[in-house]
Amino acid sequence: MNKIYTSIDSYNPQILFVMDGCCSPEISVPETNYHCHNDFIELSFITSGSVDYLIEGEKYTLKKGQVLISNPGIYHKELFDSKTRCRELHIGLTNLNLFSNSKKDYIDIGNKNVLTFNKYKNDILKTCSEIVDEQKDYNQTSPFMLKSLIMKLLVLLHREINEETPNIDSHEFSFKSREKKDLVEDIRKYLNENYVQDISLYTLSKNMYLSPVYISKIFKEVMGDSPINYLIQIRLLKSKELLENSKLSIKTIAKMVGYDDPYYFSKLYKKYYGISPNKARKEINMLY
């Protein structure tokens, strides 16, 4: 998987269609053509039973708890017969920037097109059921509810692919050294560009789409310190420059480096530099 750092503010997948399909010996289902999609991605969740598919020339049997990921250009076709009994939820999407920074509307799961759910299986199937129920009772607010449910489904799918877990063990940190450095460099860049904002480990993890524990451990492994301590150092260094090169008040300087409470800022400054901002300013004034 490519590293994904999509901002929540820019995450806005466009839903092209949502179809709840059933097939059983009692229901006649028209044969589908062998086809692909060039300008969108289709996700086909198997919510009950099983169904055969022809995917890129090979036959597969998909079962409940699996999804066919039809990326653009992937040829596929359902192979219904008299014994087929299944239910599927088909969702067509575009502007799917949560899964890939480089490929439009693309979900990378290696050299596969079928994903089997493990950790988030129950949550994903439950969300699929909620989507179907919302369509059945469709009303004026249903488009909003459907979009929120589908966005939830996509986030669960992302977590399933990336095997995100609340309790992160050593296996999650088997990144190559270069990948770790790239991640840390992206975090450092974000902190340097946004240090004025209200940043916590939680908000940082939301922007990076990674768990707080994961970010903290990788950052400390590479930098020797936590992301929040690194952020404090950035802010205090900026405040020191402002003290030395401006006549702004301590309160204003505190605000300019991300601290609404000047008293808390002064405590941090003294802890880091061994002198309060006021005394530091007096010493600077004595020099000039």
Image: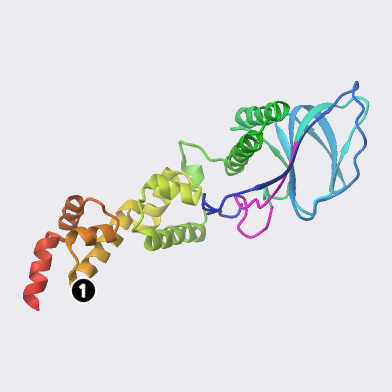
**Residue 92, image quadrant:** top right
Instruction: Give the secondary structure at mark 1.
Output: helix
Disc tally is 1
Q: Nearer the viewer, residue 178 or 208?
A: 208
Q: Is residue 192 left or right of residue 167?
A: left
Residue 18 x/y as whole percent:
74, 38
- Magenta segment: does it hold 227? no
* Residue 264 percent location from the top left of the image: 19, 50
Magenta range is 90-105
Query: In the displayed structure, would residue 255 be above or below residue 78?
Result: below
The residue to which callout 1 is attached is: 245
**Residue found at the far top of this picture:** 26
Give the residue furthest to the front.
140
Residue 150 percent across, percent down from the top left: 64, 38
Q: From what the image shows, is residue 174 above or below residue 163? A: below
Quarter of the image with the C terminus in it? bottom left
Amino acid type for the residue under numbered disc 1: Asn
Whether 99 is among the magenta residues is: yes
Of residues 156 and 255, the one drawn nearer to the viewer in this rendering: 255
